[in-house]
Amino acid sequence: MPRADEPASLLISARDTSRIVTTISTEDSLLTALTGFDVAVSDITLSRDTRAFIGEGGSVVTIAGQNGGRAGMVTVAAENNGTIEGRIESSLIGVHGTTATRDDVLAGVNGAVLTVGALQVSALNASVYTAVAKVAGNTVTRRTEASLEKVTVTALPATATQGVTVLARDESTFSATSKDFQANLGMFPSVELGKAAASNEIHKSVLAMVENSTLTVTGGTVQVAAVNDMSISAETEALATINTIGGAGWKTTYSLSLGGTAAWNEVLGSVTARMRDTTVTTAGTAEGTGGDVIVSAANTSAIHSKAEAGTTVTGGTNAAVGVAVAFNAIGWDMSGFLAASLDALIGSGLGMTETPSDVEALIERSAVDAGGALTVTADGHAAINATVSNTVESIASALYGASGMGAAGLVASNRVRSTARASLKDAESGGMSVRAGGALTVAATDTAGIYANIKLVSSSTTTNDGGAGILSDAAAWIGSDHKSSDGTKTISFDDLIWLEDDYENGGDGGQMYRYLGTGATMDLGGTDYTDADYWQKSLTTSPFPTGINLTDSDSVAIGGLVVRNDVRSAVEAFISDVTVDAGSVSVTAEETATITATADSTVSSSGGSAFGTGTSLAVNGTIATNLVLSSAEALITGSSVHTSGDTTVAASNASTITATTKSMVSSGADAIGATLAFNTIGWKAQNILFQAIDALLGTSIGDEQPAAVTASIVDSALAVGGPP
């Protein structure tokens, strides 16, 4: 599309290329306590209004060439193409938010008479928003609009692809990232952590319009197009990793790790290309036929949310808990994160207000005489993805009395309310006249890809071995010639080196290695013991058996996950109250979305005792569900249609809908698993309990709303040519 710096005979341009960056770097080693992520806070607040206009709707502006001739190319362009970036560089803390209360790009001609070679009006927003912190978010309200109002244009372009072009395009990028939480939490006397989150709340409109105007183009094209091509990403990485808290050997101490992450996107607004109360003529020249008239709206955005939660606790009595939520709300206004999470779990609709995300192309109350083809298209082609992965591990060990629990809860959800609509329409029967020398096409399509995915691993291992593990380690330690913590030593062939538990320079901590080289002096704390030319892991066994629970060793592992897609869409293409004369007529509505919910869960527990006491319990619940309410309608009503070729009115629904669950549960004693997968098409939302009852018993709980596919011609007169 034309940009604001392209050459033209007359150029009216406005560009904002501002670069706004804030960065905070912290020295995490100086922190003495963790009381929340908001120890470091930053924010960016801005309001931008970029405008390029000819006329203000008052006095008429006249533009022509010298001596009453034509001007050349006239370009009116507005563009935002800057960077807004906020970062808090820390592995432990940080809250950042960017708020744009207004981020508008407007280009237009209002109240003017133009005699030109060609006219281009374009509005482009290509800004980049980036937020990085433990809690990071972008909240943006914006308009991208290109318009002609009360304009008379007479154009004779140099090429058939030129003429009158009105383009509005939003191709901005929004990225919110919550980076890994990395710390040895044993160094802090207290730990209080909230939810790590990344979010984007984008309220936008993209509009290209021509109203109350007269456009006459000889040998060229008239195009009115609106495109939403935004990229929106919210990602949270693993929140907490806790190692060796408490006394794993002599006594049981309690440690707790809470790892919660959330990533979500809320996207509201419409994409509209509109021609209203306008007269358009694209006549031919002596050298060729007339040009095309194109009105098109498209949503090709990519929306992605991903949440990771990994929590590991080792030591005495402990619990590891991980909660991760990722969801996208398109065409739904959320009242808050908790309400949206509850809705994702049970489908209640609580706290969610329906505001459909419309993609619409229309010609209304206008007279169109296209020398070439006339095309009106609305295309919903968004890619929407919610992904959650979580690994939760609890390893509890002691002489006696230790217990462990690993629990993970995950939700991945997409909730979409959308409409794709293409139309030719008038307020009164036969009042609007349309002619096309070529094909007349009115087409609406929904080809969105909507995906929700979860991968879960939750495990708990508890050992109370009466000190056998300590004695075994002590025996191996005593039998060594040196330890890795001894520093620089002179060693000889066949010497045994014991690696401390926290050894990280190559080799397994808590293991013995045999030296295979000649006498040498080396730093035992900086040696790579995986070098097979010089080192071999010793197979020396301990006289003390390990891994046997001598007292009650309670171990509980719990995993629960829900994957849910709620997709409600309407695809409409119609001609209403219009007189049509064209080479051929095609009115089509196509629903071909791909909707997938996938849940993969593994839960394991190891505990109990050698004497049959104690508890080992693994519980796993896995649910994947798709709810689809859809309609596709193609219609000619109240119209008169004459074609020298074919007339086609067609509607179809060829969507692919898949719900997949994979579940594995294991335990030293008791294992409980429940796996459910639902595809609900043509039934209104209900909670998961009712869905389960309905699936098991074949009841009809809930309200029916059949998926509709309709193609019809009503109250119209057709004179159709083409082959018999």
Image: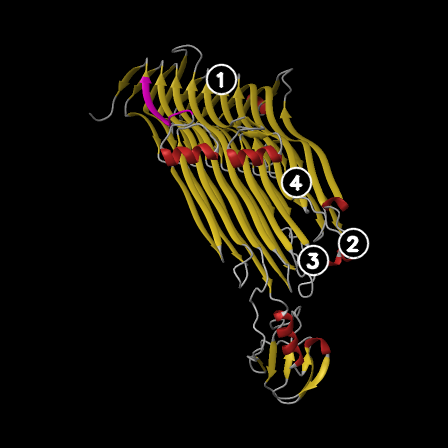
Task: Please identify, in this view, whether the residue under mark 4 or under mark 1 is nearer the observer.
Answer: 4
Contact, mark 1 vs mark 3 (Cβ under 8 Å):
no
Residue 222 visible here? no
Give the residue number, with chain letter if any, for mark 4.
137
Q: Nearer the viewer, residue 421 or 351?
A: 351
Give the residue number, with chain letter if any, for mark 2.
31
Contact, mark 2 vs mark 4 (Cβ under 8 Å):
no
Residue 665 visible here? yes
Three-letter residue code for mark 2: Leu
Q: Is residue 363 left or right of residue 92?
A: left
Three-letter residue code for mark 4: Gly
Q: Earlier in the sequence, mark 1 or mark 3?
A: 3
Three-letter residue code for mark 1: Thr
Task: Please identify, in this view, whether the residue under mark 3 or under mark 4 is nearer the observer.
Answer: 3
What is the distance, in whole Å, between disc 3 and disc 4 at their CAs? 38 Å
What is the distance, in whole Å, between disc 2 and disc 4 at their CAs? 24 Å
What is the distance, in whole Å, between disc 2 and disc 3 at their CAs? 24 Å
Three-letter residue code for mark 3: Thr
Q: Nearer the viewer, residue 533 or 470?
A: 470
Q: Is residue 553 left or right of residue 374?
A: right
Mark 4 closeness class: few <14, some 14–19, many ≥20 residues within 10 Å: many
Q: Earlier in the sequence, mark 1 or mark 2?
A: 2
Residue 415 locus on image (x, y percent): 51, 34
* 397 up-or-down from 601: above or below: below
Q: Which residues are magenta?
A: 703-713
Q: Earlier in the sequence, mark 2 or mark 4?
A: 2
Residue 302 locus on image (x, y percent): 52, 41
Q: Earlier in the sequence, mark 2 or mark 3?
A: 2
Give the residue number, with chain letter if any, for mark 1.
278
